[in-house]
Image (cartoon, rainbow, N blue to C red):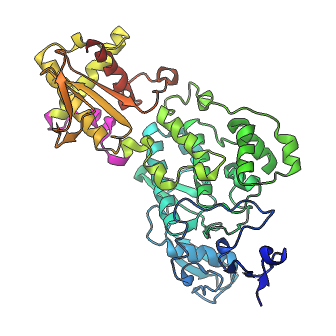
Amino acid sequence: MPQECAAGSGKRARGNQFNCRTCVYDFYPWQTAYISGMPRLSKARVYADVNLNRPREYWDYETYDIKWGYVPVKKKKIKREIKILENLRGITNVISLEAVVKDPVSRTPALIFEYVDNRDFKELYHTLTDYDIRYYMFELLRALDACHSMGIMHRDVKPHNVMINHSQRQLRLIDWGLAEFYHPGQEYNVRVASRYFKGPELLVDFQMYDYSLDLWSLGCVFASMIFRKEPFFHGHDNCDQLVRIVKVLGTDELFQYLAKYEITLDPRLTDIIGRHTKKRWDRFVHADNQHLVSPEAIDFLDKLLRYDHAERLTAREAMEHPYFFRHRKGATAERLMNDRESCDPLRRHIFLMFVRMQVYFKGNNHLAGPDFFTSNQDRQLLDALVRVILRLFYTHDLRFKYSAVVVFSTGSMCVGGELDNGKFNTRTRRFAGRQAMFIQFYKSRPTPDLQGLGYSNITDNWYCLINRIVTGYLKVV
């Protein structure tokens, strides 16, 4: 017989069914009314109802019968991992389960996976370039978005579980032993994830977490990569782990999060947390890591390491962040600058222009003025540069984040221009301007101080530096 829920009797049922005047609950806890005294209901912003819309056999691992090489074994954790791996078979960047067997002598179950020629992350991470980090973070996000879209949380993202064959540019997300199917409103065990990568929700005993837990863990991995600090949050135990987080993200922000979800903090934690103000991320930048820390990297990190799990980027949103601008479309400055043997004259012109600009900056230590491009050849090169830059910007989903002002050698000026087949369309406003050529990008918010982050050449962050280069041309309008 179903028991009455809190709204009907003031008691919480022990089984899987509740029944009262206003709600009926059979297995799906998000269908119940809010129970007084419990934390506020939280629901994932994406893929919340994936498992609700799938047949029960997709996520019900308790009745799943494993086809062992020998005798079936019913162990909840093993069955859950195998069921999840079966569901994720063929998913991009997820380790492939090849077979499930059992040792005939010891009767020990064994899972057989594909082989990855992995290199220890403690050695590898210190050798990764800025582009390498962007590449592998994007590949890891592809795996997370895929599993999240299938209603699965990994719950143990950390460097130890990210296998990288650097010579083959191959990444695999492994160890799905703690992975779980997500159901909105369900309370999950907080004793998951490794200490250094535990989200704040786990450390304050908030059980209605969701996919965003994986994004916090990914943010910790990312921070350790770009700041060359492994692990980034280094607590000695779970209490100290929360303290380490609070020292970076701030005390006030933590208590705002607790109040929002009506979470009661353990009195022991309240005593040891202390009072801390939120630190700026650039305080972790130093001579050894400044070449890895770009403005968009800091913005990306800031959107991952948030107390409030609902405010973190989803895996899909993270993949669309400007930090992955170069990787996402494949049209990178590195390829333009290194493509010296290309038969495309435009690419050669762009390369020469980049080189001449770098030489100019090193010799004069200030922005190039309009007199820098005076000859017809210079104007042709700059015109090519303008067209390629705009094409890159306006084909990389950034037209709502950037606007452009461009002056051509003809003297006409374009404001907020858009491209049709490489040419400005008729909807663009044009009017007469000075006989000069320039391009300027405006962001929706102030551009971070690039010099303070150690930018010295175009390769470091080409489109931000181009922004600095062409700023000088505004003076001629």
Quarter in which the C terminus is drawn: top left
Q: Residue at x 75, y 53 (%)?
A: 203
Judge left or right: residue 230 versus residue 472. Answer: right
Magenta region includes residue 340? yes
Name the spot of residue 311 as percent of width and height, x first.
59, 49
User: How many numbered discs, if any?
Assistant: 0
Quarter in which the N terminus is drawn: bottom right
Magenta region includes residue 73? no
Judge left or right: residue 39 versus residue 148. Answer: right
In which quadrant of the rendered view does residue 444 lie?
A: top left
Work out whether 414 lies above or below 186.
above
Name the spot of residue 112 as percent of width and height, x first.
55, 73
Q: Quick one: which residue is furthest to the front in this view?
A: 21
Camera-nearest residue between 473 and 71:
473
Name the spot of residue 281 as percent of width and height, x first.
60, 32
Q: Which residue is drawn at 47% across and 24% down?
A: 450
Q: Residue at x 32, y 39 (%)?
A: 332
Work out whether 82 lies above or below 445.
below
What stretch of residues is rendered in magenta? 328-345
Camera-nearest residue between 340 and 418:
418
Q: Is residue 98 visible?
A: no
Q: Can residue 80 be seen in this view?
A: yes
Judge left or right: residue 79 versus residue 356. Answer: right
Name the spot of residue 213 as percent of width and height, x first.
62, 56
